Image (cartoon, rainbow, N blue to C red):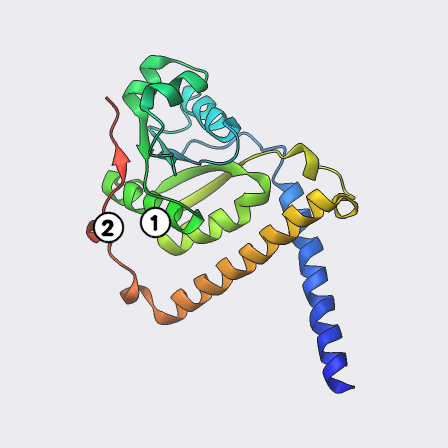
Amino acid sequence: MKFLTFIGVITLIWAIGLFAFADRVRGFTPAPEPARADAIVALTGPSAERVNAAIRLLEQDKGQRLLISGVNREVRRQELRALTPGSNRLFNCCVDLGFEAEDTIGNAQEIAAWADAKGYDSLIVVTSDYHMARALTEIRAAAPAVELTPHAVETPSLDNSRWWRAAVTARRMTLEYMKYLAALGRAGVAKARGPGNAAPAEDLDLPVEKAA
Protein backbone atom coordinates (compact mmCIF):
# COMPACT_ATOMS: atom_id res chain seq x y z
CA MET A 1 0.00 0.00 0.00
CA LYS A 2 2.83 2.40 0.89
CA PHE A 3 4.49 1.61 -2.42
CA LEU A 4 1.29 2.36 -4.36
CA THR A 5 0.88 5.61 -2.42
CA PHE A 6 4.46 6.54 -3.30
CA ILE A 7 3.87 5.81 -6.99
CA GLY A 8 0.66 7.85 -6.88
CA VAL A 9 2.45 10.85 -5.34
CA ILE A 10 5.26 10.67 -7.89
CA THR A 11 2.74 10.45 -10.73
CA LEU A 12 0.84 13.45 -9.40
CA ILE A 13 4.03 15.51 -9.09
CA TRP A 14 5.01 14.49 -12.63
CA ALA A 15 1.59 15.49 -13.99
CA ILE A 16 1.65 18.86 -12.20
CA GLY A 17 5.10 19.44 -13.64
CA LEU A 18 3.87 18.60 -17.14
CA PHE A 19 1.06 21.15 -17.00
CA ALA A 20 3.41 23.76 -15.51
CA PHE A 21 5.82 23.05 -18.37
CA ALA A 22 3.00 23.41 -20.91
CA ASP A 23 2.07 26.81 -19.44
CA ARG A 24 5.69 27.87 -19.74
CA VAL A 25 5.77 26.76 -23.38
CA ARG A 26 2.66 28.78 -24.17
CA GLY A 27 4.12 31.75 -22.29
CA PHE A 28 7.10 31.98 -24.65
CA THR A 29 4.84 33.33 -27.42
CA PRO A 30 4.09 35.77 -28.76
CA ALA A 31 7.77 36.58 -28.49
CA PRO A 32 8.41 40.13 -27.26
CA GLU A 33 10.78 42.45 -29.08
CA PRO A 34 14.21 41.43 -27.74
CA ALA A 35 16.87 43.88 -26.66
CA ARG A 36 19.98 43.91 -28.81
CA ALA A 37 22.54 41.22 -28.00
CA ASP A 38 26.04 40.50 -29.27
CA ALA A 39 24.71 37.88 -31.68
CA ILE A 40 21.81 35.60 -32.62
CA VAL A 41 21.65 31.80 -32.77
CA ALA A 42 18.98 29.68 -34.44
CA LEU A 43 18.52 25.96 -33.81
CA THR A 44 17.28 24.21 -36.93
CA GLY A 45 14.06 22.22 -36.79
CA PRO A 46 11.26 20.67 -38.83
CA SER A 47 10.49 23.92 -40.67
CA ALA A 48 12.36 26.98 -41.91
CA GLU A 49 10.43 29.36 -39.63
CA ARG A 50 13.09 29.32 -36.92
CA VAL A 51 15.74 30.41 -39.40
CA ASN A 52 13.40 32.98 -40.95
CA ALA A 53 12.71 34.51 -37.55
CA ALA A 54 16.44 34.70 -36.82
CA ILE A 55 17.14 36.34 -40.19
CA ARG A 56 14.50 38.97 -39.44
CA LEU A 57 16.21 39.75 -36.12
CA LEU A 58 19.52 40.10 -37.93
CA GLU A 59 17.90 42.50 -40.42
CA GLN A 60 16.68 44.54 -37.45
CA ASP A 61 20.26 44.75 -36.13
CA LYS A 62 19.46 42.77 -33.00
CA GLY A 63 22.91 41.20 -33.17
CA GLN A 64 26.21 41.41 -35.05
CA ARG A 65 26.07 37.91 -36.54
CA LEU A 66 23.84 34.86 -36.78
CA LEU A 67 24.77 31.22 -36.27
CA ILE A 68 22.41 28.63 -37.74
CA SER A 69 23.20 25.51 -35.74
CA GLY A 70 22.49 21.95 -36.84
CA VAL A 71 22.37 22.47 -40.59
CA ASN A 72 22.15 19.28 -42.64
CA ARG A 73 25.52 18.54 -44.24
CA GLU A 74 23.83 18.01 -47.61
CA VAL A 75 22.32 21.51 -47.62
CA ARG A 76 24.42 24.02 -49.49
CA ARG A 77 24.72 27.61 -48.40
CA GLN A 78 22.96 28.96 -51.48
CA GLU A 79 20.10 26.49 -51.02
CA LEU A 80 19.51 27.63 -47.45
CA ARG A 81 19.73 31.26 -48.51
CA ALA A 82 17.11 30.68 -51.20
CA LEU A 83 14.68 29.33 -48.57
CA THR A 84 15.00 32.35 -46.28
CA PRO A 85 13.78 35.90 -46.85
CA GLY A 86 16.02 38.93 -46.55
CA SER A 87 19.10 40.49 -48.03
CA ASN A 88 21.65 38.31 -49.80
CA ARG A 89 24.32 40.79 -48.74
CA LEU A 90 23.40 40.35 -45.10
CA PHE A 91 23.31 36.57 -45.43
CA ASN A 92 26.72 36.52 -47.10
CA CYS A 93 28.44 38.82 -44.63
CA CYS A 94 26.93 37.93 -41.29
CA VAL A 95 25.60 34.35 -41.21
CA ASP A 96 27.60 31.30 -40.11
CA LEU A 97 26.43 27.72 -40.60
CA GLY A 98 27.10 24.92 -38.11
CA PHE A 99 26.95 21.40 -39.55
CA GLU A 100 27.99 19.12 -36.69
CA ALA A 101 25.09 19.29 -34.23
CA GLU A 102 22.65 16.37 -34.48
CA ASP A 103 20.63 17.11 -31.35
CA THR A 104 20.08 19.85 -28.78
CA ILE A 105 23.18 18.88 -26.80
CA GLY A 106 25.20 19.21 -29.99
CA ASN A 107 23.54 22.57 -30.70
CA ALA A 108 24.58 23.80 -27.26
CA GLN A 109 28.19 22.71 -27.74
CA GLU A 110 28.29 24.25 -31.20
CA ILE A 111 26.82 27.52 -29.94
CA ALA A 112 29.14 27.66 -26.93
CA ALA A 113 32.24 27.12 -29.07
CA TRP A 114 31.10 29.73 -31.60
CA ALA A 115 30.32 32.32 -28.94
CA ASP A 116 33.66 31.71 -27.25
CA ALA A 117 35.57 31.99 -30.53
CA LYS A 118 33.80 35.25 -31.38
CA GLY A 119 34.02 36.68 -27.87
CA TYR A 120 30.24 37.07 -27.50
CA ASP A 121 28.78 37.55 -24.03
CA SER A 122 25.07 37.73 -24.95
CA LEU A 123 22.93 35.79 -27.43
CA ILE A 124 19.36 35.82 -28.67
CA VAL A 125 18.23 32.19 -28.93
CA VAL A 126 15.69 31.35 -31.64
CA THR A 127 13.86 28.03 -31.64
CA SER A 128 10.31 26.69 -31.37
CA ASP A 129 8.26 27.47 -28.25
CA TYR A 130 8.06 23.82 -27.11
CA HIS A 131 11.84 23.43 -27.57
CA MET A 132 12.93 26.68 -25.91
CA ALA A 133 13.15 25.59 -22.27
CA ARG A 134 15.35 22.60 -23.10
CA ALA A 135 17.49 24.61 -25.51
CA LEU A 136 18.14 27.29 -22.89
CA THR A 137 19.01 24.65 -20.28
CA GLU A 138 21.52 22.92 -22.56
CA ILE A 139 23.11 26.16 -23.78
CA ARG A 140 23.44 27.53 -20.23
CA ALA A 141 25.16 24.31 -19.20
CA ALA A 142 27.60 24.58 -22.11
CA ALA A 143 28.12 28.37 -21.85
CA PRO A 144 27.23 29.46 -18.30
CA ALA A 145 28.81 32.90 -18.64
CA VAL A 146 26.76 33.88 -21.71
CA GLU A 147 23.53 35.85 -21.24
CA LEU A 148 20.65 34.28 -23.17
CA THR A 149 17.48 35.96 -24.41
CA PRO A 150 14.75 33.61 -25.74
CA HIS A 151 12.89 34.46 -28.93
CA ALA A 152 10.44 31.62 -29.56
CA VAL A 153 8.65 30.66 -32.76
CA GLU A 154 5.03 29.77 -32.09
CA THR A 155 3.70 26.27 -32.73
CA PRO A 156 0.01 26.94 -33.55
CA SER A 157 -1.19 23.48 -32.50
CA LEU A 158 0.16 24.03 -28.97
CA ASP A 159 -1.54 27.39 -28.50
CA ASN A 160 -4.76 25.70 -27.40
CA SER A 161 -5.12 25.53 -23.61
CA ARG A 162 -6.61 22.05 -24.06
CA TRP A 163 -3.56 20.64 -25.85
CA TRP A 164 -3.86 17.49 -23.74
CA ARG A 165 -7.13 16.49 -25.45
CA ALA A 166 -5.48 15.83 -28.81
CA ALA A 167 -3.17 12.83 -29.09
CA VAL A 168 -0.65 14.60 -31.35
CA THR A 169 -0.20 17.66 -29.15
CA ALA A 170 -0.30 15.66 -25.92
CA ARG A 171 2.44 13.38 -27.23
CA ARG A 172 4.62 16.27 -28.37
CA MET A 173 4.27 18.15 -25.08
CA THR A 174 4.86 15.04 -22.97
CA LEU A 175 7.89 13.94 -24.97
CA GLU A 176 9.44 17.40 -24.78
CA TYR A 177 8.74 17.56 -21.04
CA MET A 178 10.61 14.29 -20.52
CA LYS A 179 13.53 15.54 -22.60
CA TYR A 180 13.52 18.77 -20.58
CA LEU A 181 13.67 16.82 -17.31
CA ALA A 182 16.63 14.86 -18.68
CA ALA A 183 18.35 18.12 -19.63
CA LEU A 184 17.79 19.48 -16.13
CA GLY A 185 19.29 16.30 -14.71
CA ARG A 186 22.39 16.56 -16.90
CA ALA A 187 22.80 20.23 -16.02
CA GLY A 188 22.51 19.45 -12.32
CA VAL A 189 25.13 16.70 -12.52
CA ALA A 190 27.50 18.94 -14.51
CA LYS A 191 27.09 21.75 -11.99
CA ALA A 192 27.78 19.39 -9.09
CA ARG A 193 30.96 18.18 -10.75
CA GLY A 194 32.17 21.74 -11.16
CA PRO A 195 33.44 23.75 -14.15
CA GLY A 196 36.74 21.93 -14.23
CA ASN A 197 35.12 18.93 -15.89
CA ALA A 198 33.82 20.84 -18.91
CA ALA A 199 35.81 20.72 -22.13
CA PRO A 200 37.33 24.12 -22.90
CA ALA A 201 35.96 25.73 -26.02
CA GLU A 202 39.38 25.89 -27.63
CA ASP A 203 39.55 22.08 -27.53
CA LEU A 204 36.30 21.70 -29.43
CA ASP A 205 36.19 21.30 -33.18
CA LEU A 206 34.29 24.44 -34.18
CA PRO A 207 31.83 23.12 -36.82
CA VAL A 208 31.08 26.39 -38.53
CA GLU A 209 31.20 27.44 -42.13
CA LYS A 210 32.29 31.06 -42.27
CA ALA A 211 30.40 33.50 -44.45
CA ALA A 212 31.70 33.76 -47.97
Tag 1 secondary structure: helix
Tell which circle, 1 or 2, labels the residue nearer the N-terminal end.
1
Examine the image and state in which quarter residue 124 appears. Answer: top left
Q: Which residue lies at the image location 78% right of the left edge and 44% below the top edge?
A: 162
Depth order, front residue of 193/145: 193
Mark 2 neighbour density, 10 Å: few (under 14) some (14–19) many (20 or more): few
**Pointer 1 with pointer 2, Cβ within 8 A:** yes
Q: Which residue lies at the image location 42% right of the left edge and 19% below the top edge?
A: 59
Q: Which residue lies at the image location 50% right of the left edge and 37% below the top edge?
A: 127
User: Does residue 10 lie above or below 35 as drawn?
Assistant: below
Would residue 51 appear left or right of 119 to someone viewing this image?
right
Mark 1 neighbour density, 10 Å: few (under 14) some (14–19) many (20 or more): many
Q: Quadrant of the C terminus?
A: top left
User: Does residue 81 lie above or below 131 as drawn?
Assistant: above
Work out whether residue 34 can be spotted: yes
Depth order, front residue of 57/187: 187
Q: Amino acid at mark 2?
A: Leu
Q: Residue furthest bottom?
A: 2
